[in-house]
């Protein structure tokens, strides 16, 4: 392996982990505060659509930035709706989260039809209206930022307490449900950015269901990382590495010029995940009050 | 009726229009009026700029030209096919078209349950007394794409990116590789596949990543057969200033200067022709001849010979497909249709091995 291919490999890994990392960090905020968030996938989808929509409308004048901004806002609003259901009205979080995912899967083609007269995909963004690296740096920065927040700030402590022992937090005078709502909204912003990094950085348009399960992978990375930002980032890195290995080994001749059948290569990420989950991770403990609505006395 | 408002002249005019309409319809032998066609599209949806878009445009053409009534639905997952097909059959639809190999099983079941209806399926061979299977000779078209790629490649390294490693896509791959080797025996083909689930057809970022990897290894032309994921391959080619080849529909317009040509699979023609046949066989009361099923059912193949597959040439790729390239490709096309070149077919090659 020479320097060039090492560079190619590592940049592929970074690209692959960016959208998942955004969503996993969003999931971290929401789940640490006690709200299960399987709606990450839907929030990503919303972000990827509105990101492209804004970037197309601001062609030439800071398009990708406006796209990112819009993706965050749209993801946040969508998440606020989820928060309304599960925090205010105490709906079952798994059911409501699934509903949000279905809603996003239906809403995005619907909006796309209204704006672009196509249920499949949006027109594509020209090269200068796309990001090259920014989302990657932002996601890394956020991971370290959230790590610092969880360790060093009162806010970090409150969020953990909202998920572990909300009653204790309430006695300390913090409004648990308000805190949870903001955590869920923030998770929507981050997941929206994850979606936007897919559509305005890693590709050039929105296409239906383009998140392709990345929201759920983010959730897995979060659990894998024991609901902590940096370990979750490690898990995203691991997923991205195994997927990139899989991609780069496809069709590469080994042992006397014959490539390994692609079906075997494509098993690599799944097998690696199973091995790691079964062997190394150990017990992953969820926040104690995860999924339990809090009745403010 | 609101016609009163327009008075006597209005009535005369509307009568004339109506008379003209009916006479045109019967004079042209267009018994499509009243024929109800239902179409179930695959998950890509009618705007995938590819396979489903082609089927959709074929049915639309039938609607405009043959005056049929036509409804379509887009399936959102594999479990939706059977209920969608069934609901068309339960209503008064005469002909139900399923688009995509994923519907094969559902189609087999539903067509058996409704022997009085006509069914057609694109991209799969379903046996049944009332089912027509529309199959395309993808390997022949892919062979031409391979030849184009080999002619345009400077490095002699050529790439293929498929959606999933399924027989249909392997057929593209095998034909493509044969075309490459026919022009340049020393050239190599690297094949990659996007994934293992249905998401693979809708995952442009991953297709782009695969394409970037190939370009970084010296590949300079990539043929993609990956549905909506293909746009990721085009993005990568644009960024790296390399070439890509489109698939299914004419995709040349998506990135002029980057896309050499597209292998067109004329699903639109196959759908249109099927509807037209049914429309033409109907008598004035809209009844089909008793033995119509016999002529209708069975396998119909669309290849280079009947322009069921072809390569796309338009204003967007005139520069890339220069006269001498075009001449060579047309020459190869002639050799395939005349049987001089036999393009290896994954379907039969597999059977031969057993």
Image: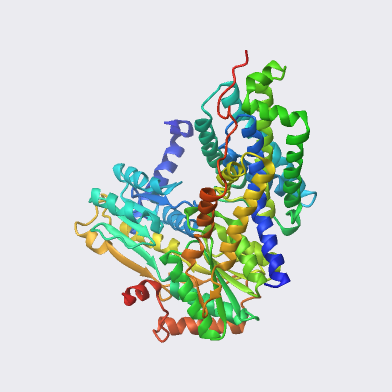
- Taking the image as shown, residue B229 lies to the left or right of residue B18, namely right
> Does the image show residue B49?
no
The vertical placement of A87 against A64, above or below, is: above
Q: Is residue B4 above or below residue B217?
A: above
Residue at 52% across / 66% down in the picture? B247
Q: Position of residue B294 (x, y in %)?
A: 22, 62
Residue ID at (63%, 24%): A165
Left or right, A138 with reference to A276: right
x then y, percent, for residue B347: 37, 71
Quadrant the C terminus of chain B occupies: bottom left
Q: Nearer the viewer, residue B118 or A218?
A: A218
Q: Position of residue B327 (x, y in %)?
A: 56, 84
Residue A181 sits above or below residue A63 on the image: above
Identity of the residue furthest to the top in this view? A297
Residue A35 on image: x %, y %: 60, 30
Quarter the N terminus of chain B occupies: top left
Quarter-wise, where is residue B188 in the image?
Answer: bottom right
Q: What residue lies at 39% left-to-right and 45% top-to-bottom?
A: B80
Asked whether A223 or B292 is in front, the reply is A223
Q: Nearer the viewer, residue A150 or A30?
A: A150
In the rendered structure, the answer to whether residue B233 lies left or right of residue A4 reads: left
């Amino acid at each position: 392996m020479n320097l060039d291919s090492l560079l190619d490999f590592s940049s592929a890994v970074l690209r692959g982990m960016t959208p998942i990392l955004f969503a996993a960090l969003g999931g971290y905020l929401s789940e640490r505060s006690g709200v299960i968030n399987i709606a990450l996938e839907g929030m990503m989808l919303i972000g990827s659509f509105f990101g492209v929509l804004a970037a197309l409308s601001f062609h030439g004048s800071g398009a990708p930035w406006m796209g990112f901004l819009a993706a965050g806002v749209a993801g946040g609003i969508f998440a606020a709706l989820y928060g309304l259901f599960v925090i205010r009205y105490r709906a079952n979080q798994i059911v409501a989260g699934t509903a949000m995912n279905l809603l996003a899967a239906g809403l995005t083609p619907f909006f796309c039809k209204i704006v672009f007269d196509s249920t499949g995909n949006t027109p594509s963004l020209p090269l200068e209206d796309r990001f090259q690296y920014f989302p990657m740096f932002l996601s890394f920065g956020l991971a370290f930022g959230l790590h610092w927040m969880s360790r060093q700030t009162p806010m970090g402590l409150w969020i953990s307490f909202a998920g572990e022992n909300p009653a204790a937090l309430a006695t300390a005078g913090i409004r648990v449900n308000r805190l949870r709502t903001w955590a869920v909204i923030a998770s929507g912003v981050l997941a929206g950015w994850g979606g936007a990094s897919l559509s305005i950085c890693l590709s050039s348009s929105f296409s239906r269901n383009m998140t392709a399960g990345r929201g759920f992978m983010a959730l897995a990375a979060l659990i894998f990382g024991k609901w902590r930002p940096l370990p979750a980032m490690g898990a995203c890195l691991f997923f991205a590495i195994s997927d990139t290995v899989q991609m780069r080994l496809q069709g590469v001749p080994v042992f006397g010029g014959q490539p390994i059948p692609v079906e075997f290569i494509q098993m690599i990420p799944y097998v690696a995940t199973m091995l790691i989950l079964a062997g190394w991770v150990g017990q992953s403990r969820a926040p104690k009050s995860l999924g339990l609505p809090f009745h403010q006395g | 009726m609101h016609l009163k408002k327009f008075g006597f002249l209005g009535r005369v005019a509307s009568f004339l229009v109506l008379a003209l309409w009916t006479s045109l319809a019967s004079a042209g032998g267009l018994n499509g009026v009243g024929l109800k066609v239902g179409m179930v599209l695959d998950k890509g949806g009618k705007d995938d700029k590819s396979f489903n878009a082609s089927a959709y445009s074929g049915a639309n053409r039938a609607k405009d030209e043959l005056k049929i009534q036509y409804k379509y639905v887009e399936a959102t997952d594999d479990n939706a096919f059977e209920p969608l097909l069934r609901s068309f059959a339960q209503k008064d639809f005469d002909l139900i078209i399923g688009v995509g190999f994923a519907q094969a099983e559902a189609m087999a079941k539903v067509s058996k349950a409704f022997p009085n209806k006509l069914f057609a399926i694109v991209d799969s061979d379903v046996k049944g007394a009332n089912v027509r299977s529309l199959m395309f000779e993808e390997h022949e078209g892919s062979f031409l794409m391979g030849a184009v790629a080999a002619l345009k490649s400077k490095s002699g390294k050529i790439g293929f990116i498929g959606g999933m490693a399924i027989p249909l896509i392997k057929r593209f791959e095998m034909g493509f590789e044969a075309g490459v080797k026919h022009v340049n025996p020393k050239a190599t083909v690297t094949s990659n596949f996007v994934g293992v689930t249905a998401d693979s057809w809708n995952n442009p970022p991953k297709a782009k990543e695969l394409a970037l990897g190939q370009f970084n290894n010296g590949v300079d032309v990539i043929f993609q057969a990956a549905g909506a994921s293909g746009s990721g391959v085009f993005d990568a080619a644009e960024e790296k200033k390399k070439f890509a080849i489109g698939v299914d529909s004419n995709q040349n317009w998506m990135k002029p200067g980057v896309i050499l040509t597209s292998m067109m699979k004329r699903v639109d023609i196959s759908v249109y022709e099927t509807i037209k046949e049914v429309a033409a066989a109907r008598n004035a009361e809209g009844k089909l001849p008793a033995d119509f099923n016999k002529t209708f059912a069975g396998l119909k193949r669309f290849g280079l010979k009947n322009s069921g597959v072809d390569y796309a040439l338009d204003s967007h790729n005139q520069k890339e497909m220069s006269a001498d390239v075009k001449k060579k490709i047309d020459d190869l096309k002639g050799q395939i249709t005349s049987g001089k070149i036999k393009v290896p077919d994954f379907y039969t090659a597999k059977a031969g091995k057993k």
